[in-house]
Image: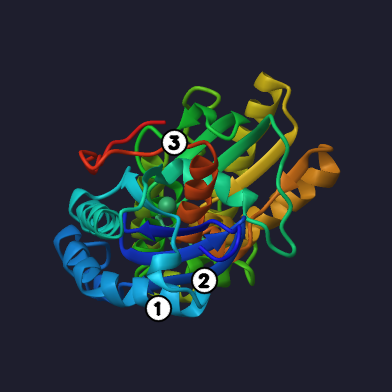
Amino acid sequence: MSDNKSYILGIESSCDDTGAAVIANGRVLSNVVATQEIHREYGGVVPELASRAHQQNIVPVVHQALRIANIDKNQLSAIAFTRGPGLMGSLLVGTSFAKSLALGLQLPLIEVNHMQAHILAHFIKAESQSAPSFPFLAMTISGGHTQIVKVTDYFDMEVIGETLDDAVGEAFDKSAKLLGLPYPGGPLLDKYAQQGDSKRFAFPKPKVSPLDFSFSGLKTAVLYFIEKETKANPNFVAENINDICASIQFTIVDYLMDKLKNAVEATGITQVAIGGGVSANSGVRNAIKEAQEGYGWTTYIPKFEYCTDNAAMIAMVGQLKYERNDFSSQAIAATPRMKF
Ligand code: KG4
Ligand code: ZN
């Protein structure tokens, strides 16, 4: 290496996005994501198709990440990869690739927990993004996860609440599907919601323990509601799409905020960070911003590209572990149900 920088390559392949990124001293030099469009046709992620697409994408995505970062692979300091949690076939592609590359280049290999990475994405150095100080609460909300985590230090995290069934992103996507919107429907539901009356229709908020979540009941409530209303008026959904979306979104956001309030109360921690694809939701973003004023919390929302699945967050964790000499052996295996 000609300078003192450590160049960490991050590889992400836990679900349906193939990502590669290079980070140097906390700054992202490149962050490439190939999103797999094929799943749209099926209304959800098809695991077998996802792993095949990862295989096709991984070499060009890594090449592109190195090219954009303007470095040669021989300048890399370490290879970080998502070990889990995620889809087994998808994880295997990134894991095998990372292991082979590390072996070939004789570089240290660093395993990364995808859920920890969503949280540590807050430590990426970027304009309009500031890092929380410890301890803080992190709510990770995406298509695969819904958790509230107490973060005491970089690698000292405790899940204090999580979903008992569907993830919140699934609640958005499944509700959108029932309304006839294409997959993934979350962003579209959000778009319609912004023009609707959120108090027009009421949906129940499932009762579980104070810090846990349940979303499967909401999906059923939306289904019964639509069935009932379309019996009386076959054009009900088309005529009321904005108000229906606004009411569903209001219910979900209110529920997320209830849980966050419970977590703040239970821990006494008022620094609150969010992450994951659902952090892009306008209702969530507004509610989090209002909580800053309303409840006196200090809130953190990462830049959009570090909210959805990305490799920059994997490289970020890679860098933190590299500084701690926390390396993995070549015997490491992908782990679909990985815990902290
Ligand atoms: O983090 P992510 O990109 O991938 C997973 O790890 O799942 O999150 C994707 C999820 C999908 O369920 C998608 O519908 C949801 O995030 N999402 C949204 C919005 N943007 C993405 N949900 C509601 N409103 C949005 N604006
Ligand atoms: Zn994720």
**Relative horizontal placement of residue 266, taking residue 311 as reference (left or right):** right
The residue pinned by badge 1 equals: 64
Above or below residue 4? Residue 118 is: above
> Disc 2 on helix, strand or loop?
strand
Q: Which mark is residue 30?
A: 2
- Which of 70/33 is in front? 70
Q: Which mark is residue 200?
A: none
Where is residue 216 drawn, in percent x and y? Answer: 36, 42
Say whether disc 1 or disc 3 marks the residue closer to the N-terminus. 1
Where is residue 281 drawn, in percent x and y? Answer: 58, 60
Residue 256: quadrant of the picture: top right
Callout 2: CB less than 8 Å from ligand 1: no
- Which of 270/11 is in front? 11
> Disc 1 on helix, strand or loop?
helix
The residue pinned by badge 3 equals: 326
User: Could you tell me if residue 79 is visible in this image?
Assistant: yes
Q: Amino acid at mark 3?
A: Asp
Say whether disc 3 or disc 2 marks the residue closer to the N-terminus. 2
Mark 1–mark 2 Cα distance, whole angstroms, equals 8 Å
Asked whether the residues under the numbered discs 1 and 2 touch, taking CB atoms below 8 Å apart as contact, a structural biologist would say yes
**Relative horizontal placement of residue 117, taking residue 102 as reference (left or right):** right
Residue 165: quadrant of the picture: top left
**Relative horizontal placement of residue 273, taking residue 22 as reference (left or right):** right
**Residue located 34% across and 62% down the image:** 178
**Residue located 31% across and 77% down the image:** 60
Q: Residues within 10 Å of mark 2 (few under 14, many from 20)?
A: many
Mark 3–mark 2 Cα distance, whole angstroms, equals 23 Å
In the picture, which quadrant includes the C terminus? top left
Mark 1–mark 3 Cα distance, whole angstroms, equals 27 Å
Where is residue 258 drawn, in percent x and y? Answer: 63, 35
